[in-house]
């Protein structure tokens, strides 16, 4: 990991619905490093508080991640004793789940150990040191769980891509969604972060892709959207129950 990187002065929020990019001034850079996968930074901003950015793009903000977490964990209940989070290296969804269900066992499958390490220190304050949380460093398609889960939250990052470039994204979600039945207990639930609720013409409509794939595999799906200020628009979520 290359730690010799200059401080960020501005971070960005691409808005899928309009194609614009919102620039957010940085008050203070808390930590930054370049991993094998991406440029990772934690910064303080006046507008959105403390933010995790990947390659300069805001992924999580202290000002509004609670609304995002609540949407992703909508179906969490006392019947959920084990939760798998795919992505989620910032630790926010795991922390929110444990706040709701203290006896929950959480597994987080995150591809980049540097994201988890940096956020554990500067964002979610030790969530990956919690004995109730197991951190698996792996990409989503290589993950091989030892048991099934009562709930699965897909918290992967996304970025605007055109419809042609989105073919690889579509293939990834095809493969991931096909694995879900083997990872989910009977009666379990899945929630997927599905990108922007609406996208401008020419961009991949990830929410539509995910909803179609989930319906194809499970027979039905439900979709909702929540406005996330640090994303500049509504974020779509797709849900299913087995």
Image: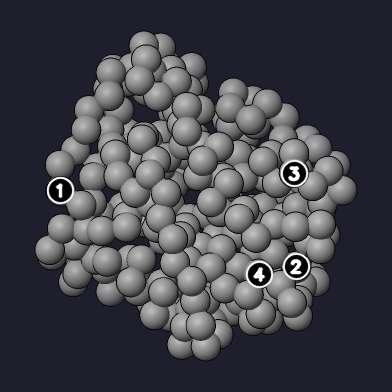
Residue 136 at what x, y percent from top left?
69, 54
Disc 2 vs disc 4: Cβ atoms closer than 8 Å?
A: yes
View extreme (top): residue: 27
Q: Nearer the viewer, mark 3 or mark 1?
A: 3
Label 4, label 1: how many angstroms apart (C-alpha)? 33 Å
Label 3, label 1: how many angstroms apart (C-alpha)? 36 Å
Quadrant in the rendering for residue 198: bottom left
Mark identifier at residue 100: 3
Disc 3 vs disc 1: Cβ atoms closer than 8 Å?
A: no
Residue 65 at what x, y percent from top left?
51, 37
Find disc 2 in the rendering and name its residue.
150
Q: Earlier in the sequence, mark 3 or mark 4?
A: 3
| Left or right: 180 as drawn, with respect to 7 | right
Label 3, label 2: how many angstroms apart (C-alpha)? 15 Å
Q: Looking at the picture, does residue 197 appear above or below residue 10?
A: below
Q: Observer-nearest residue: 80 or 163?
A: 80
Find disc 1 in the rendering and name its residue.
19
Q: Nearer the viewer, mark 3 or mark 2?
A: 3
């Amino acid at each position: 990991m290359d730690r010799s990187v200059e401080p960020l002065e501005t971070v960005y929020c691409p808005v899928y619905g309009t194609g614009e990019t919102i620039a957010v001034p940085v008050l203070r850079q808390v930590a930054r490093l370049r991993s094998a996968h991406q440029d990772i930074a934690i910064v303080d901003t006046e507008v959105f508080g403390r933010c995790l950015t990947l390659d300069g793009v805001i992924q999580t903000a202290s000002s509004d991640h609670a609304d995002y977490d609540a949407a992703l964990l909508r179906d969490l209940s006392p019947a959920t004793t084990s939760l798998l989070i795919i992505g989620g290296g910032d630790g926010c969804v795991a922390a929110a789940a444990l706040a709701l269900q203290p006896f929950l066992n959480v597994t987080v499958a995150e591809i980049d150990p540097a994201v988890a390490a940096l956020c554990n220190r500067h964002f979610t304050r030790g969530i990956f040191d919690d004995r109730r949380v197991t951190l698996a460093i792996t990409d989503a398609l290589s993950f091989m769980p030892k048991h099934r889960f009562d709930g699965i939250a897909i918290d992967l990052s996304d970025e605007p891509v055109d419809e042609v470039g989105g073919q690889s994204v579509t293939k990834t979600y095809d493969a991931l969604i096909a694995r879900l039945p083997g990872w989910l207990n009977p009666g379990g639930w899945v929630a997927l972060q599905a990108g922007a609720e609406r996208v401008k013409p020419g961009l991949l409509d990830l929410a539509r892709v995910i909803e179609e794939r989930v319906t194809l595999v499970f027979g039905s799906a439900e979709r909702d959207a929540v406005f996330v200020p640090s994303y500049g628009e509504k974020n779509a979520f797709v849900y299913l129950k087995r």
